[in-house]
Structures are given as structure tokens and as C-alpha cells.
Image (tube, rainbow, N blue to C red):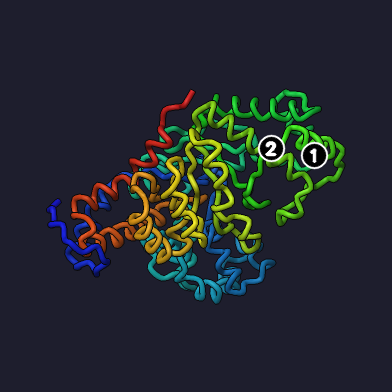
């Protein structure tokens, strides 16, 4: 690639079309290591026989509901007993309103690039449905993930598998949660943990031993990272709590006979918060002992509800001081708390910032965030892509959007004299593959 001279000004400047074209071309050739995926195993995808509305369900359907699609109608859209034209008719007005969001853009890219459908409408939905159903066959992931998206592998959170299972190493390495053991919820959960781990849980010490056993089970299946999504159910501030305080909560929880544990609540409504906080710190000590990076959900929540303020990245800062040997991977650029996560990534050597989900949450916000983060922190701490989708076509589309965002940001940086064109290519390679590969290597950590 031609090296352009370094200029004195570091102010942003519009990139020349030729420069942007050059970077797009070179970045398009790069392989990707995806920091975060929820992709079904290929055989599960084939068995599910995904169709048009299956793909729409993740995440485009959320924006359609935000646009006014009744939730009751949304639940019927993937029902094959209802004629497809009828389902499309009830969905189309809200699709029209949502098709330009990040989710809408990703869906349209997938439909155009993979299925040749540039405009989804009443006259093309049958063609789309047939084409997607036909894709449900062996080789789907090789075609879409490897050949089209150039994704070497991704970090898989297969949350729908209760017990840890080793994924296909051609496509995935494994991240697993310990959240169940951090926030059990009720006495029935403790009994289920005993069955899953074979460990008696009659005390706080037993709960810790069960967590340790589940970690060993997960490591045996190739686990390379601990993940936490407790932001969906509580504030992610984890105070230091004594054994005594946690034990009191454990004793109360062990007597909690409610059939359903507390759902997504504000932090003031967590009845066993002392236990949860104490167990989270135990999980961090295990991460340190096993040299496992920790991925933490921060920022906006999937779906159409939830307490977003619980997810602020700044809630986590005590952890970074307490566990300097633990590498933290903070998800989703903390959107909308982008400035908070940028400061944390700048200050703490053990904090990395992850753009998984970000390019489809808001492409323009992701571009602004990337430009500012490159000014604020070493680029080796930024993970530029995680598909965060359940279906491969959409992970592909997200990768297209990520490459475009990175090319646009870096082209403007070069135009403004911030770096040379060859520097920009070096940075892009780190963002898309090298940084994630360093944190999440294919080789098991056992």
C-alpha cells in the first residue's frame, strides 16, 4: 500500500474518494477474529430450518416493535401455519420505518449480498423465504463465515446450552458464564446446581465449590473466557462484601421457596445483593487464578425493556483496581455511555473496549466512538468487531458494516494527518483480528 506523508495537523478532514477506496479494498481483504457471537451450531441452525422471519427476529424485530408493531403480532411472525403474505402484510409498515436503522441496514445487506434481494416487499418475500430455507444445509458456515465474511473464528456464548459443550473448533472458541452461581435467585436454583455439578450446596462454601466445579467442567470443554450478562438483571456495581454478610444472604436464599426468582430489577430491589456481590468477586479471583479474560456486558440491553442505567461501565471501576492481573473486555462500547468506557480504556492497563454489537446499534455512533478512542487509548486495546448475532447471514452483514466504519474513520485520520495510510492498515488489522486473537486464542488455556 502506498505510504502517504505525515502532516502536521491532526484535525479530522474529509477523506479523498481515492484514499477511502484504497482503504476499503485493503481492509476488505483482512481476516477477522470475532470477539463475540451467539451463532447456533450449524447442525442446530439446519434443524431449526430458519426462514425469513427467523432472521428478522434478531435484532430487527426489536426496532419494528419500537416503531409500533404490537408485541402480540411480533410473536406470530415466524408461525409457518399463518400464510407468509399475511405475516408480511402485518409486518411491512413497521419494517419500512425500521429499515434504515443499524439493524435494518444489516438485514438489508444480508438479503442483497447473500440472497440477491435488493428490496424486500410483498412481491419478493416468497423468493426470500425459499432462498433462506434452501441455505439450511451442511456447508452453510463455511460459505458464509469463512468465505464471505472472512471470519477465522469467533468467541461463542452459547447461552442456550445449559451445560458446557465444546463447539466446532473450525468456527468457534468458547466463553461461558458463571452468573447462575453469582445470582442463584431461589432455593430451587441451588438444588439444580447440585444436580449439574454433583456438589452439595448447604452453605456459602458449597456455593463457591459448585462454581469452581462448573468452571472446571467448562474448561474441560475448551472455555477460554468468562462472560457476564448480569447487567440484564441488576446494576453492575459489585461491592466488596464480607463472608459474614454473604452467608446471611445465602441462609435467607436457601429458604426462599418462590417458584420464580426475581426477574430484571433495579439494584434497590435485589434481595440477596450482598451474596451476589461476594460471589462475583469470587468469580474474579477464579479468573485471575486461571488467567481467563472476563467479558462483561455494558450499555444498552437487547429487547424492548430493561434498566439501561444499571449497565454504566463506570460502575465496574473498583474491579479494575482490585484485580489488575485480570484482563477485562467491556462489551458494546458501553453505548450510550461511550465517554465512560473510553476513559476506563485509557486509564486502566487491564481494560479493553469491545465494538461487538456496536456497528449495528448505531453505525454513526460507532464511527464517532472509534475516532475518539483512537485519540484516547492505544489501538491495541480496541476490539473492532463482534457479530453478536444468532444467524450467520447477519454476522456477515455486520462484518461488512464494521469494515466500512473502520475504513471511513481511518481514511479521515489519514486525510487529517493523524497517521499514514500504511499506519491505518496496521491499525485496521489489529482492530479486526490481532487484538481479539491475543485475548482469545484458539488454543485452550488448560
User: How far is mark 1 from mark 2, CA to CA?
Assistant: 10 Å
Between 324 and 360, the one nearer to me in the picture: 324
Q: Residue at x 46, y 51 (%)?
A: 356
- Callout 1: helix, strand or loop? helix
x 43%, y 61%: residue: 106
Q: Which circle's residue, 1 or 2, is located before the other in the chain?
A: 1
Percent from the top left, x then y, of residue 431?
A: 34, 48
Determine crowd level at label 2: few under 14, some 14-19, many 20+ residues with C-alpha closer than 10 A.
many
Residue 253 in the image: state x and y as whole percent: 82, 39
> Within the image, what quadrant is residue 180 found in?
top right
187 or 340: nearer the eye? 340
Question: What element does badge 2 sit on?
Answer: helix
As drawn, is 305 to the left or to the right of 124? right
Q: Residue at x 30, y 61 (%)?
A: 409
Asked whether residue 87 appears in the rendered view, the answer is yes
Q: Is residue 174 visible?
A: no
Q: Is residue 281 left or right of residue 249?
A: left
Residue 249 circle label:
1
Q: Residue at 56% of width from left, 64% of height from top?
A: 61
* Nearer-the-camera pick, 144 or 436: 436
Nearest to the observer: residue 388 or residue 91: 388
Q: Are marks 1 and 2 in contact (CB under 8 Å)?
A: yes
Q: Is residue 219 left or right of residue 206?
A: left
Q: Residue 64, how many percent across, how many down?
A: 57, 69
Tag 1: Cα neighbours inside 10 Å, few (<14), some, or many (≥20)?
some
Q: Position of residue 128 (x, y in %)?
A: 46, 62
Residue 32 location, quadrant? top left
The residue at which mark 2 appears reads as: 278
Amino acid at each position: 500500500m502506498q505510504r502517504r506523508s505525515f502532516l502536521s495537523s491532526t484535525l479530522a478532514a474529509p477523506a479523498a474518494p481515492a484514499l477511502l477506496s484504497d482503504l476499503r479494498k485493503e481492509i476488505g481483504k483482512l481476516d477477522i477474529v470475532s470477539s463475540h457471537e451467539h451463532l447456533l451450531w450449524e447442525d442446530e441452525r439446519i434443524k431449526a430450518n430458519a426462514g425469513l422471519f427467523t432472521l428478522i427476529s434478531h435484532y430487527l424485530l426489536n426496532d419494528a416493535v419500537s416503531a409500533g408493531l404490537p408485541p402480540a403480532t411480533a410473536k406470530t411472525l415466524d408461525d409457518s401455519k399463518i400464510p407468509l403474505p399475511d405475516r408480511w402484510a402485518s409486518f411491512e409498515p413497521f419494517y419500512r420505518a425500521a429499515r434504515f436503522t443499524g439493524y435494518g441496514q444489516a438485514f438489508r445487506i444480508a438479503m442483497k449480498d447473500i440472497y440477491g434481494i435488493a428490496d424486500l416487499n410483498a412481491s419478493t418475500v416468497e423468493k426470500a423465504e425459499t432462498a433462506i430455507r434452501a441455505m439450511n444445509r451442511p456447508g452453510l458456515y463455511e460459505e458464509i463465515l469463512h468465505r464471505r465474511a472472512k471470519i477465522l473464528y469467533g468467541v461463542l456464548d452459547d447461552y442456550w446450552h445449559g451445560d458446557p459443550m465444546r463447539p466446532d473448533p473450525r468456527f468457534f472458541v468458547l466463553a461461558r458464564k458463571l452468573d447462575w452461581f453469582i445470582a442463584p435467585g431461589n432455593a430451587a436454583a441451588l438444588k439444580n446446581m447440585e444436580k449439574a455439578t454433583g456438589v452439595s450446596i448447604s452453605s456459602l462454601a458449597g456455593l463457591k465449590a459448585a462454581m469452581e466445579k462448573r468452571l472446571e467442567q467448562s474448561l474441560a470443554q475448551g472455555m477460554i473466557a468468562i462472560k457476564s450478562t448480569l447487567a440484564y438483571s441488576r446494576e453492575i456495581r459489585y461491592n466488596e462484601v464480607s463472608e459474614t454478610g454473604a452467608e446471611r444472604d445465602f441462609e435467607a436464599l436457601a429458604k426462599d421457596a418462590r417458584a420464580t426468582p426475581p426477574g430484571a430489577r433495579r439494584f434497590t430491589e435485589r434481595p440477596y445483593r450482598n451474596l451476589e456481590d461476594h460471589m462475583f468477586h469470587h468469580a474474579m479471583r477464579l479468573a485471575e487464578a486461571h488467567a481467563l479474560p472476563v467479558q462483561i456486558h455494558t450499555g444498552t440491553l437487547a429487547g424492548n425493556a430493561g434498566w439501561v442505567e444499571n449497565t454504566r461501565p463506570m460502575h465496574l471501576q473498583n474491579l479494575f483496581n482490585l484485580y489488575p492481573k485480570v484482563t477485562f473486555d467491556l462489551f458494546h462500547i458501553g453505548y450510550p455511555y461511550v465517554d465512560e468506557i473510553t476513559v476506563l480504556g485509557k486509564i486502566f492497563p487491564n481494560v479493553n473496549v469491545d465494538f461487538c454489537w456496536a456497528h449495528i446499534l448505531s453505525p454513526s455512533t460507532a464511527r464517532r466512538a472509534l475516532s475518539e478512542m483512537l485519540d484516547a487509548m492505544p489501538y491495541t486495546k480496541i476490539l473492532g468487531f463482534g457479530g453478536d448475532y444468532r444467524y450467520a447471514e447477519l454476522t456477515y452483514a455486520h462484518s461488512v458494516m464494521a469494515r466500512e466504519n473502520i475504513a471511513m474513520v481511518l481514511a479521515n485520520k489519514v486525510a487529517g494527518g493523524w497517521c499514514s495510510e500504511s499506519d491505518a492498515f496496521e491499525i485496521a488489522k489489529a482492530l479486526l483480528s490481532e487484538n481479539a486473537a491475543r485475548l482469545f486464542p484458539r488454543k485452550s488455556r488448560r
